[in-house]
Amino acid sequence: MTPRPPTPPAHPAGGAPDPSGSDRDDLRRRNLAAVLQAVHLRDGSTRADLTRETGLHRSTVRALVAELVRAGIVTEDLPAPSGGVGRPSPRVHATDATRVLTLHPELDATHGALVGLGGRVLARARVPHDAPPTPDDVLAAARELRDRLAPTGPLRGVGVAAPGLVDRRTGHVVVAPHLGWRDVPLGPLLAAALDAPVTVDNDANCGVVAEALFGAGRGARAVVYLNGGASGIGGSVADGGTPTVGAHGFGGEIGHTLVRSDGRPCHCGADGCLETEVSRARLLAALGDVPASELEPTLARVVAARPSTALAEIDRQLGYLGVALRTVVNVLNPERIVLGGFLAALVRTRGTAALDAHLARALPGAREDARVVTAALGADLLAVGAAQLVLRDVLADPLSTGR
């Protein structure tokens, strides 16, 4: 069985709770949170599963689940008879009542989705852009996506995966170079436009949380996520499912790791960054300017036909990616390195031999458990990750109104 991510402790430290009403309410909230967190991470858990995972008494779990059922947050059903001895334990499922609107502005479109508990994407849509969108373009797209995806019914909030450096405290996009944005108060602007609470984070931070909780990083404590897209290479690090973002929230910019001292100038002002040497645009050009939608099948044909100048470019990019990953392993000691976007396509079609050669030269110990895998969530990745920005508050206090 795949290891489950850790569930927060249900009981406060220090033994028996204070008998005062406020402490009893706090204990109840913690216990409700522990149960809902377990359902969120493994939808369809039985009451017996929840009892084991939370450490609570089975009668307590039964009462807490009943409370969540009355609130419409979860539902219960009995599994089909197995022929075994004894009554089967009811399975607990999250309902679709808890809904989050997610947004991801990119160069060619603003993507939206409606996401529920358990990492379930309930609906998705996109608003295309003819040019890199301005903040006003994204506000207009957000209104349209809200009206298309959630015309009725309450939203618990809006989670935004932004392609740039984000001040997580204020929701400001400090810089999004590929969009041409600097010091944009995206969170406050969207909150006013949508009349809903908005939380903004860097898209790679959203991606690493999604893969750590629900995807290829599930069960690993330390996860590094790297995604290659039209806007460059985003990176992030998670420990126990929580991003490790540094003093001001700007950590994880692995795309700006130096991999070639005499390399091309990067838009960040440095030379030879990973994303200047490992680039989707350069890859597509080497493949004959194929559309991005044809990238992976074209890569597969090139690898099968070998040799060619296109294959040489594929191997060149994988080599520089390996240089960066050796540094990642030495500095961060991850268990899992998750690759998404065109980086995943490179590995799926060419394999990991080039990466493994570089990782073999990482420090002993740090390299022993490091494993390179491709992202598992596909098109749902950023929607699932951005939704966690809002759902973490729901999970902490399941019966709060959220407003």
Image (cartoon, grey):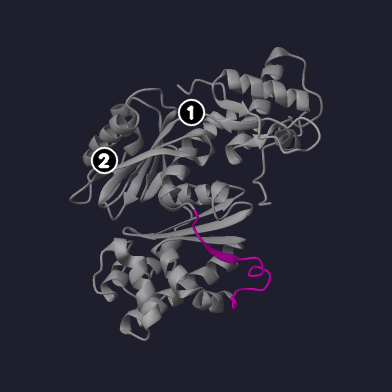
Residue marked by disc 2: 138
Q: Is 82 positioned to the left or the right of 201 in the image?
A: right
Q: CA distance from mark 2 to mark 1?
A: 24 Å
Q: Nearer the viewer, residue 123 or 164?
A: 123
Main SS class of the magenta portion in the image: loop
Q: Is residue 37 left or right of residue 273?
A: right
Q: Position of residue 134 (x, y in %)?
A: 22, 44
Q: Quadrant of residue 395?
A: top right
As drawn, 293 above or below 264: above
Q: Around disc 2, counting alpha carbons within 10 Å, would you say few (fewer than 14), some (14 to 19), or many (20 or more)?
A: many
Q: Which residues are magenta?
A: 360-376
Rendered residue at 44%/52% (across/down): 204
Going by the picture, which residue comes out furthest to the top?
21
Name the secondary structure under disc 2: helix
Answer whether residue 367 is magenta in the image: yes
Q: Is residue 300 visible?
A: yes
- Which residue is under mark 1? 98
Q: Amino acid at mark 1?
A: Thr
Say above or below: 302 vs 68: below
Q: Amino acid at mark 2?
A: Val
How many numbered marks does the figure carry? 2
Residue at 68% in and 16% down: 22
Q: Is residue 221 magenta?
A: no
Image vertical order of residue 119 relative to residue 178, above or below: above
Image quarter of the C terminus: top left
